[in-house]
Image (tube, helix red, strand yellow):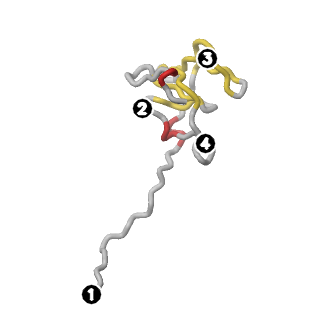
Amino acid sequence: MKMRNAFKLAPKQSRRLPTEYFILANVRFEGQVVGYLAGRPIREMATDGGGLRYRFVGVAARNAAGGPDVQSLRKGEWIVQPGLVYASINDDVCVAPADRAA
């Protein structure tokens, strides 16, 4: 007698997250220029439309498709176009640029 499993396996779910969920919009930049990316200055601070402040912590890693790898972001980190990572300084989770692995 053959045993049959009554359970069907669910199709494998994609771990792809919408990038738009992790991008800050309506950003104002302030502070010193800490570097350049694609010929554009990178400012040390950014403020979003709601008044929350962020500090530059690095450049966003890329996924296999060439887009920003949002799964590599830490808690409190956000992407600012054209692929910069800023961490919230309103939380206790701010990471200093020197502490972040390249």
Q: Tag 4's secondary structure?
A: loop
In the figure, is residue 56 to the left or right of 95? right
In the image, residue 40 lies at what x, y percent?
69, 23
Q: Are marks 4 and 2 in contact (CB under 8 Å)?
A: no
In the image, residue 58 lies at what x, y percent?
56, 27
- Residue 75, label in figure: 2
Residue at (50, 49) in percent of width and height: 16
| Upstream in sequence: badge 2 or badge 3 | 3
Asked whether the viewer can see residue 54, the reply is no
Say what amino acid the circle numbered 2 marks. Answer: Lys
Q: CA distance from mark 4 to mark 2?
A: 19 Å
Residue at (63, 44) in percent of width and height: 66
| Quarter that holds the N terminus | bottom left
Q: Nearer the viewer, residue 29 or 37?
A: 37
Say what amino acid the circle numbered 1 marks. Answer: Met
| Upstream in sequence: badge 1 or badge 2 | 1
Residue at (48, 41) in percent of width and height: 71
Q: Residue under label 3, please give it.
A: 34
Q: How many neighbours does mark 4 have within 10 angstroms: few (below 14), some (14-19), or many (20 or more)? A: few
In the image, residue 39 lies at what x, y percent?
72, 24
Asked whether the viewer can see residue 10, the reply is yes
| Upstream in sequence: badge 4 or badge 1 | 1
Relative height, residue 22 to residue 42 (above, below): below
Q: Residue under label 1, please give it.
A: 1
Q: CA distance from mark 1 to mark 2?
A: 53 Å
Q: CA distance from mark 4 to mark 1?
A: 52 Å
Say what amino acid the circle numbered 3 marks. Answer: Val
- Residue 67, label in figure: 4
